[in-house]
């Protein structure tokens, strides 16, 4: 099966977007004042690096073999980011007063991060719709799910950072 150039370009675009996201998360981590924000941004930067590795692997397969690699092995990674965040949150929560609010700069970084994740979700969903390859569709669906999980982590922790007391009272957190 011959792979069209647009498929390689889509993966190159994905790699570039993930790289920009990683850079943003690292910068946000360095500027963050709240321990949860620092840890969350560090964790997300690591996940974006993992996404870059995955994309490179699929790109190499397309370029060298002319076909999409099987995406079945990606299923084992589902839910890992949420588990990592739960561990981070529990550790941070044990060491800080649960009513400590984050500073405005941390909150703004979360809002920007949510926007980055939203754009990645849309990109991957669009790519999944455009492909005729089942492996490509599974790959893009997986990536969209991963970014959706990151979005939920950011949204949930942003709600906590904006109003910790209300967050605990509502009891509607991620875990």
Image: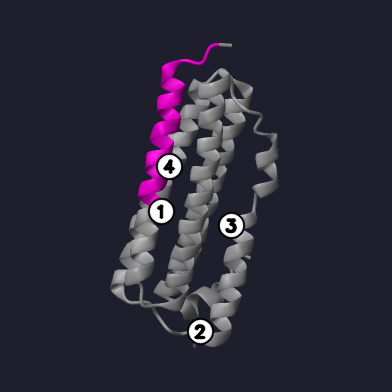
Instruction: Kindly identify the residue that appears in the image at 63 percent across and 23 percent down.
Output: 134
Mark 4 lies on residue: 120
Instruction: Kindly identify the residue that appears in the image at 48 percent across and 70 percent down.
Output: 39
- Whether residue 173 is visible, yes or no, is no
Q: How is the image coloured?
A: one colour
Q: Is residue 20 left or right of residue 146?
A: left
Q: Which of marks 3 and 2 precedes in the sequence?
A: 3
Mark 3 lies on residue: 81
For discs 2 and 3, the disc positioned in front in the rendered view: 3
Tell me residue 128's x, y (percent). 52, 28
Identify the element where label 4 is drawn.
Answer: helix
Tell me residue 52's x, y (percent). 48, 44
Mark 2 lies on residue: 98
Q: Which of marks 2 and 4 precedes in the sequence?
A: 2
What's drawn in magenta, residue-wise? 2-22
On-image quarter of the N terminus: top right
Distance between mark 4 and mark 2 Cα atoms: 32 Å
Q: Is residue 159 left or right of residue 145?
A: left
Distance between mark 4 and mark 3 Cα atoms: 16 Å
Q: Is residue 149 left or right of residue 75?
A: left
**Majority SS type along the magenta span:** helix
Distance between mark 2 and mark 1 Cα atoms: 28 Å
Instruction: Kindly identify the residue that appears in the image at 53 percent across and 29 percent down.
Output: 60
Instruction: Kindly identify the residue that appears in the image at 46 percent across and 41 percent down.
Output: 121
Residue 84 location, quadrant: bottom right
Indicate yes or no whether the magenta region holds residue 91. no
């Amino acid at each position: 099966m011959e792979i069209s150039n647009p498929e390689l370009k889509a993966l190159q675009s994905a790699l570039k977007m993930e790289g920009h996201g990683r850079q943003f998360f690292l910068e946000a981590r360095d500027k963050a004042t709240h321990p949860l924000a620092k840890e969350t941004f560090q964790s997300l930067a690591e996940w974006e690096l993992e996404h870059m590795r995955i994309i490179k692997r699929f790109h190499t397969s397309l370029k060298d073999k002319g076909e999409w690699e099987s995406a079945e092995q990606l299923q084992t990674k589902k839910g890992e980011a949420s588990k990592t965040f739960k561990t981070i949150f529990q550790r941070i929560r044990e060491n800080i007063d649960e009513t400590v609010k984050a500073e405005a700069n941390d909150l703004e970084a979360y809002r920007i991060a949510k926007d980055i994740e939203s754009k990645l979700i849309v990109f991957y969903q669009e790519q999944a719709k455009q492909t005729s390859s089942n492996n490509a569709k599974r790959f893009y669906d997986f990536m969209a799910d991963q970014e959706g999980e990151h979005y939920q982590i950011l949204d949930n922790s942003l709600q906590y950072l904006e109003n910790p007391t209300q967050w605990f009272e509502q009891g509607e957190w991620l875990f």
